[in-house]
Image (cartoon, rainbow, N blue to C red):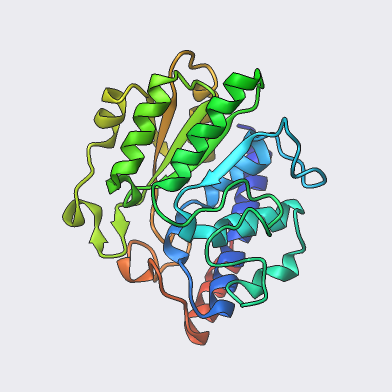
Amino acid sequence: MEQAKKQQLAKIANQLRLDIVEEVHAAKSGHPGGSLSIADIITYLYYEEMNVNPQNPADPDRDRFVLSKGHTAPALYAVLAEKGFFPREELVTLRKVDSFLQGHPDMKHTPGVDMTTGSLGLGISAACGMALAAKIDGKNYRTYTIVGDGESEEGQVWEACMFAAHYKLDNFCMILDLNGLQIDGPITEVMNPTPHDQKLAAFGFHVIVADGHDFDAIEAAFAEAKTVKGKPTAIIFNTVKGKGVSFMENQVGWHGSAPNDEQYAQAVAELSKN
């Protein structure tokens, strides 16, 4: 990837992280850790990978994106606002009663959201249905979904994986955010779902493992995914929970906690240096 493009994407991802921190601070609740860990991935998806248009969010030929780990909605809202699906000023209304930016994505009220998610396991299942619909309808759009590593402990995730492989959904890309932590602690201690790469391969996926904070690696992973025929692809991105904010990184307590005023100021100061 050209250095200038890489710098541009890094700048956007950093702005998303600032937005995420601001959203959760304003709401006094939310999930910053996993939102920050996917900021680079979701930046690449919306600015380089996917065919989406803020002026026509319901375009039937658009690529589809489903945030299966719906609690990290602050990251999705941040990128949708940056792309122009709705005004950035709305971000601070996160989780307010009269806001269209609720704690989990809502396809009926939020422009650019393709699927309402929250109950873990449902998002990837819906995404598989979208990918199969494209096959049936002879459409060329691709479907992407981000699944949490804690979410991967849900049996429904693996049922969806069987479905994707059975129907040879080579237009489907499962993205696994492997940051190693979930609400109750390390994933290997709560309900060990590893090794993801071997399990997904056994379920019939083409598996790619990459650094979820390196735009060269992210670009290469998505480019490889588009060459795969006859089977779905799973990209396992190794990430850092709370990435970009020093006191949040790799700290399980920031899975679902909002920063106070002092912590908010420190996070903004750190991110503003980038």
Identified at 63% across, 53% down, the residue is: 107
The location of residue 199, given as percent across then percent down, is: 25, 31
Instruction: Answer with the quarter of the image where residue 141 lies.
Output: top right
The location of residue 218, given as percent across then percent down, is: 51, 36
The location of residue 179, given as percent across then percent down, is: 35, 51
Q: Is residue 165 left or right of residue 269?
A: left
Mark yes or no: residue 78 visible: yes
Identified at 56% across, 53% down, the residue is: 116
Which of 149 and 113 lies nearest the eye of the viewer? 113
Instruction: Answer with the quarter of the image where residue 1 lies.
Output: top right
Which of 209 and 71 lies nearest the eye of the viewer? 71
Quarter of the image containing the C terminus? Answer: bottom right
Instruction: Answer with the quarter of the image where residue 251 lies.
Output: bottom left
Identified at 50% across, 40% down, the residue is: 126
Compared to residue 11, the image places residue 246 above or below, namely below
Q: Is residue 170 left or right of residue 151?
A: right
Q: Is residue 234 left or right of residue 1?
A: left
- Residue that lies at the very extreme toward the bottom in this rendered image: 261
Total count of labels: 0
Which of 184 and 164 lies nearest the eye of the viewer? 164
Identified at 48% across, 70% down, the residue is: 30
Which of 4 and 212 lies nearest the eye of the viewer? 212
Compared to residue 23, the image places residue 274 above or below, namely above
Compared to residue 257, the image places residue 106 above or below, namely above
Mark yes or no: residue 36 visible: no
The location of residue 79, given as percent across then percent down, is: 64, 54
